[in-house]
């Protein structure tokens, strides 16, 4: 009986140490040092190599390390009948909102500029963009988008939101549907993408959309890499239609070493940390599911594979 | 009749252009290009050279560019009987609070680390410090400190506050007086200094105080440079008792080029921008006072020189 950690692009160490601390007798294997594949009952995973799970004939559960399971479901060689679970953790939306507020304030207060100036011992001011003078536009007003809108509004920003279907949020001007998108964009100096990824939102952050934002707008993508047309972002930064962007998600993750985003002076790249799962916070629910899987009890947060979440 | 702008350490240009835009016929002189000193009726100033104002025998008002006037009152050669005014502007507390929230989030989310990693195309995560797990301690619960406490608490941080006299703030644990200072410090992982500068608070950020904070604490000073004993900060960073500091105010401003803070890897230096006056927002009250000074009408926001504000 063993729990296998299969992770690429991130370190396994924090997970292994928290799992061990929580249940010291647990037999933990870390891919690719798997040992006997027949001993593996449970896989805890983030971005596994395609086809990996069909090697484990006694596998009783595939547990995502995060809220999303696309990285599991996209595997054409998933073993049939093995249930998949995801993480449901109240700190994740909070973590995302903190990230978004941080990025917005860093932009308005020219934080990166001051860090550069410090290296050169330069004491030079740049007038900040005051919250009350900047229009923030949030695309996607689900739980996350709605909370982010409320927090930014409380800090004094002019916040508008756009959603596929109409929503009402206190203190936030809301727009909905295709016919109100242009009006929403025209108000927006800082655009925050928090949309779900669907056929209708894929590639939505494109040249046509950027052109409808206020000139010199700033774009923050914390949803999915597939929302953004990468070449269109580079073009809009070159023409000045956009003044910068902060990206936490990418079409390929980890972002390849030779990708132009890494070295672009107007792009902030972070390694998918906006709603990072904190191992200490979620290890208890993972261990609980491990025991449930072994004993055949119903799993927590099992994914409906047809719906995709 | 002329208005003289006397400023050191910052650029005069944004002020001159906003003054001109607001009142195109105004005769504006920019120190040191003063022309005939007898033509100067009104001085708009930040950190003037000591003794400068006694050269202008027709001076009717000395107007600070900011909320503070210590930079004027510390001049032993001020001309007698010339009234002094300061800026009262509602956006300044807001600006300070945004700065403080930005710095707290950058610390908790390791923003500077990710900027360094981007230069090296490194995709590596560091577990963030979640708001709910970090104790923030605010010293000074006046208007600014109280507002900052409320905003940080609304974002989910555990906020405590300390004040010379007792204060009550919703959702914030408050301490007061010397006998509750140690208990307040013991709760504090991120310390924010928003105290007024008085003989009792000068040098309060010292080795003894740092030792009473949680190990690896972070210190943010946005009040006055004189609150901080600089050598004690360097010592506490060296021993690891403090993990870092963000300083916006200094004993000497601009911070001298050879000062060790500039190159210290654990210190963020910003050039006194936390509650920066926005010229566009305050030029109307300055021009109003210029006309009042010329016509002998009562000035707005005149300082009581004995009280010092």
Image: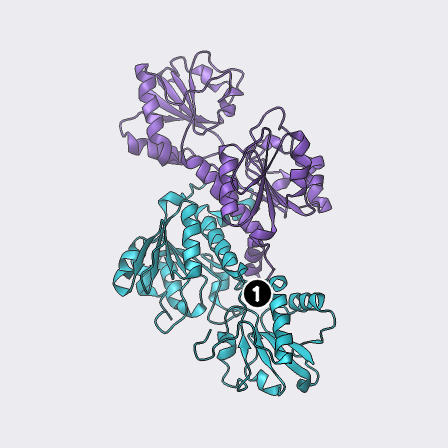
Chain colours: A purple, B cyan
The residue lying furthest to the front in this view is B297
The quadrant where residue A280 appears: top left
The residue lying furthest to the left in this view is B179
Position of the N terminus of chain B, as image quadrant, is bottom right
Q: Which residue is drawn at 44% across and 15% down?
A: A55
Q: Position of residue A68 (x, y in %)?
A: 48, 27
Q: In this view, does A147 lie above or below A60?
A: below
Crowd class of label 1 (few under 14; some 14 to 19; many from 20; radius 10 Å): some
Q: Can residue A273 be seen in this view?
A: no
Q: Position of residue B224 (x, y in %)?
A: 45, 67
Q: Can residue B91 be seen in this view?
A: yes
The quadrant where residue B197 appears: bottom left
Instruction: Label 1: state its secondary structure.
Output: loop
Report the side of A215 relative to A15 (left or right).
Answer: right
Q: Of B191 and B70, which appears nearest the observer? A: B70
Q: Of B249 and B41, which appears nearest the observer? A: B41
Q: Of B270 and B290, which appears nearest the observer? A: B290
Q: Where is residue A92 in the image (x, y as percent from the top left)?
A: 44, 35
Q: Where is residue A24 in the image (x, y as percent from the top left)?
A: 27, 30
Report the side of A133 relative to B253 (left or right).
Answer: right
What is the tally of numbered marks visible in this picture?
1
The quadrant where residue B89 appears: bottom right
- Which residue matches tag 1? A123
Chain to which the residue tagged by mark 1 belongs: A
Q: Which residue is drawn at 30% across and 57% down?
A: B184
């Amino acid at each position: 009986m063993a729990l296998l950690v299969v992770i690429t692009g991130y370190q396994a160490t924090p997970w292994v140490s928290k799992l061990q601390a929580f249940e010291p007798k647990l037999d933990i294997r870390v891919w690719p040092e798997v040992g006997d594949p027949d001993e593996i009952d449970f896989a805890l995973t983030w971005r596994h190599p395609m086809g990996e799970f069909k090697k484990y004939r006694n596998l009783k559960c595939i547990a995502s390390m995060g809220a999303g399971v696309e990285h599991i479901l996209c595997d054409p060689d998933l073993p049939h009948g093995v249930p998949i679970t995801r993480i449901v953790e109240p700190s994740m939306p909070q973590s995302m909102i903190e990230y978004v507020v941080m990025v917005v304030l860093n932009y308005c207060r020219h934080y990166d500029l001051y860090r550069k100036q410090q290296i050169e011992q330069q004491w030079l001011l740049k007038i900040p963009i005051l919250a009350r003078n900047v229009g923030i536009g949030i695309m996607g007003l689900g739980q996350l988008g709605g909370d982010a809108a409320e927090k930014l509004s409380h800090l004094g920003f002019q916040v508008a939101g756009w959603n596929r279907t109409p929503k009402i949020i206190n203190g936030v001007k809301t727009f909905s549907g295709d016919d109100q998108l242009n009006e929403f964009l025209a108000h927006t100096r800082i655009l925050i993408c928090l949309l779900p990824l669907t056929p209708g939102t894929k590639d939505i952050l494109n040249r046509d959309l950027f052109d409808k934002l206020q000139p010199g707008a700033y774009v923050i993508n914390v949803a999915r890499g597939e929302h953004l047309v990468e070449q269109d972002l580079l073009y809009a930064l070159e023409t000045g239609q956009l003044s910068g962007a902060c990206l936490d998600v990418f079409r390929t993750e980890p972002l390849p070493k030779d990708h132009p985003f890494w070295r672009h002076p107007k792009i902030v790249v972070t390694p998918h940390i906006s709603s990072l799962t904190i191992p200490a916070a979620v290890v208890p629910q993972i261990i609980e599911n491990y025991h449930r899987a072994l004993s055949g009890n119903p799993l927590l947060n099992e994914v409906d594979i047809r719906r995709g979440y």
